Amino acid sequence: MVNRDKIDLHMHSTVSDGTDTPEELLSRVRGAGLELFSLTDHDAIKGCAAVRAALRPGDPLFVCGAEFSCRDEEGKYHVLGYGYDPDSPHIRALVEEGHAIRMRKTAARLENLNRLFGIVFPEEEVQALLSLDNPGKPHIGNLMVKYGYAETKEQAIEEFIDKAKVRSEYLRPEQAIEGILKAGGVPVLAHPAFGSGSELVRGEEMERRLQRLTGMGLRGLECFYSGFSPDIIAEELFLAEKYDLYVTAGSDYHGKNKPVRLGDTHLESTSAMPGGMRRFLTDIVQG
């Protein structure tokens, strides 16, 4: 059985909004002494193929992952997919739609930043941005810092990018869950207590949300997360047990784009590995 303190199932590479390439990320995973990890790029699975190709005998166990940004009438959700068949047309269709939405949003953000604030980047920078697998707010924020429109990426996002609003367009949660399931994977709700931005979802609202998503086929909760307090972890573990869900743990590591340490999941705070995580290891990792 994998050491519970050596698990990190939520991280990002340059294929989405991280700063480490998949190969560099694998090297950091080795250095951190992790025994089980997953790459969960936003709306992308390409990085997982790169990691699998770079794995060597004796390396940590690896599970293919992805993270899909979703929204419906009730709110925003991030749905993680684990253990899917990367050749499945269902996961590929999901990735393609998520990518197309992301590209339309990026182009619209650039237009609105120009229209509202007079922010313009050299054409070669725009083309480089649009050639990325999954550009997002951090990429635009870094460009704004580079060209003197903001002092920090965080300032750029808060004072400009978030105000240059674009038409809300997302995958629906039932789309993501269905696509992951049809690809033979396991859909898990990422950082459940965190909805959108600083939104905090707790108590009855969290349980109502969970009832809806489990009705769609959701099968797991990310109960251990770098940003969670002990009481949030306890609440998520209670709900996972109540609804018989898998339990996962992730840092949400983004390299230099986020102040989160690889492997920081707070799993060490529990005295024993939760039953839902044991089942995940047995059914998904070893099964």
Image (tube, grey):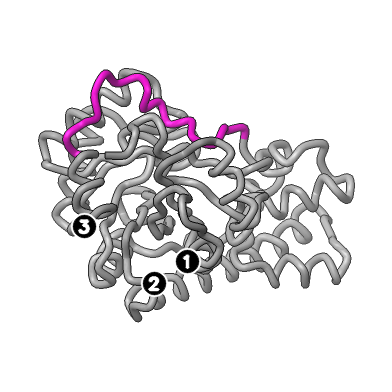
Quarter of the figure that contains the N terminus: top left
Q: Position of residue 175 (x, y in %)?
A: 30, 67
Task: Label the magenta part by its dominant secondary structure.
Answer: loop
Whether 132 is drawn above or below 34: the answer is below
Q: Secondary structure at mark 1?
A: loop
Residue bearing mark 3: 287
Q: Earlier in the sequence, mark 3 or mark 2?
A: 2
Residue drawn at point x = 19 percent, y = 31 percent: 204
Residue drawn at point x = 24 percent, y = 39 percent: 277
Q: CA distance from mark 1 to mark 2?
A: 7 Å
Residue drawn at point x = 21 percent, y = 57 percent: 287
Query: Which amino acid, by three-letter code, is at mark 2?
Result: Pro
Query: Which amino acid, by three-letter code, is at mark 1?
Result: Ile
Q: Position of residue 41 (x, y in %)?
A: 50, 57
Per the rendering, the mark at residue 132 is none
Residue bearing mark 2: 86
Per the rendering, the mark at residue 45 is 1
| CB under 8 Å between discs 3 and 2 | no
Query: Which amino acid, by three-letter code, is at mark 3?
Result: Gly
Q: Nearer the viewer, residue 60 or 122?
A: 60
In the image: residue 100, left or right of residue 237: right
Q: Is residue 75 magenta?
A: no
Q: CA distance from mark 3 to mark 1?
A: 21 Å
Q: Position of residue 44 (x, y in %)?
A: 49, 65
Q: Residues within 10 Å of mark 2 (few under 14, many from 20)?
A: some
Number of numbered callouts drawn: 3
Location of residue 103 (image quadrant): bottom right
| CB under 8 Å between discs 1 and 2 | yes
Q: Position of residue 196 (x, y in %)?
A: 45, 42
Q: Nearer the viewer, residue 254 or 281?
A: 281
Which stretch is magenta?
Answer: 259-276
Nearest to the eye among marks 3 and 1: give it.
3
